Image (tube, helix red, strand yellow):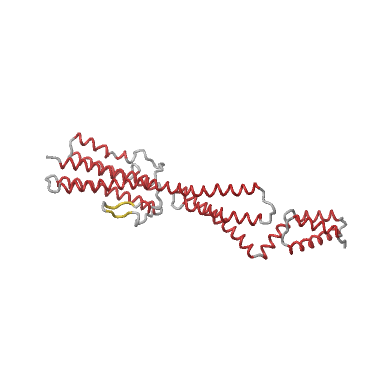
Amino acid sequence: MPELSLHNIDQISRDISRQEITFSHLLDDLIDHICCDVEYEMQSGLDFLAAYGKVKQKMGSRRLKEIQEETLYAVDLKYRHMKNTMKISGIAGTVLLGFGALFKIQHWPLSGTLMVLGLLILCLVAYPWYTWISWKDEAHITPNFLYLTIGLMLILLPGALINMNLSQTYEEGFYSHQEQQKALYGYLYRNNNSLLISCKDSLNYPAMEQFHSRTAELINYIGGIESGMISQAEGKPGAPVILSNEIIQTETGPAINYPEISKPFQTQPVTDFLLPGSKTREALNALITEYKAFISGLMPGEELSIVSGLLDISLYLPDDLTENSTVSLMSGLHSLELLKNGLLTVESGVLKVIANHK
């Protein structure tokens, strides 16, 4: 059997050392194994260079590196835990980021939180572990690699924080408009009640009380529409939920607790409840028409024309809404709150007219 010279063995040793095999026990075993393979190939009549070239071709350029990784994985529990941590964190970060994007598209809550958590896990756990495991044996890290790593961190982390801030600002902007309408409703409600109470001993009080009751009935009907829309949005298709924290009782009556609505940007409730031709929209139109007719018997023509503009339902709920319109629940609720405040404004004017009637 042909034997290798010391010069041949030294050449094989240098070549394997260039493959950055750092595990010393494995290095000696690999040299011995490759020398045996070369000697086996030389039995067929090949010289050293030809036999060595055939062995290297059979192994491939990265096989020795892969053998080292497989060996370390098998014998080094700490190394194995690091690779598992990298894989699990990479998968978890990607899944959270994907669900965050889905929640953002559907306008569901917690979208910003999920995206930020996903980015933080990828940037602070998965990517650093991957970098250390992949390049821990490198003797020299190029400036380009450092620039890439630092640049990635500078882009992703501020981007994640900005995304969370914009998400919160986006939702809070809607809430502030709704809270302003609630505050205006409370002011008008208390003002009208005060006016009614101050005229309790007047001969015109029964007419004022009757008109106040008609206004309250119409506002309660609108409140029922709001509750139905929220119940549908919070539930599943065809299965509305029973509301608990979304509607609260206040001194001015039931009020919407907007931050408790988990799906504020659903569009189907507006289509089902407020679309022209829908059952609730037609009923609301009929009630508004009856309300106008009732007012016409209480006010002179000139003053009636002033308040009639506030009772034009198309100002609050446009007649050009179609099934293809994408009006969110929050926008629909805002329109109904405007309508309720318009009714209270009309009530205030009519009550004053009745109170001053001789």
Determine whether, in the image, residue 218 is placed left or right of residue 160.
Answer: left
Task: Residue at 64% x, 65% y: name it.
Answer: 77
| Quarter of the image that includes the N terminus | bottom right
| Quarter of the image that includes the C terminus | top left
x and y percentages locating residue 207 in the rendered image: 15, 45
Q: How many marks?
A: 0
Vertical order, 99 against 277 (above or below): below
Q: Residue furthest top?
A: 302
x and y percentages locating residue 357 in the rendered image: 14, 40
The answer to which of 257 and 14 lies nearer the viewer is 14
x and y percentages locating residue 308 in the rendered image: 24, 37
The answer to which of 2 and 142 lies nearer the viewer is 142
Determine whether, in the image, residue 116 is placed left or right of residue 276.
Answer: right
The answer to which of 277 and 156 lies nearer the viewer is 156
- Picture quarter containing residue 288? top left
Vertical order, 312 against 133 (above or below): above
Task: Residue at 52% x, 48% y: name it.
Answer: 158
Vertical order, 51 against 299 (above or below): below
The answer to which of 216 and 275 lies nearer the viewer is 216
Task: Residue at 14% x, 48% y: name it.
Answer: 200
- Picture quarter containing residue 16? bottom right
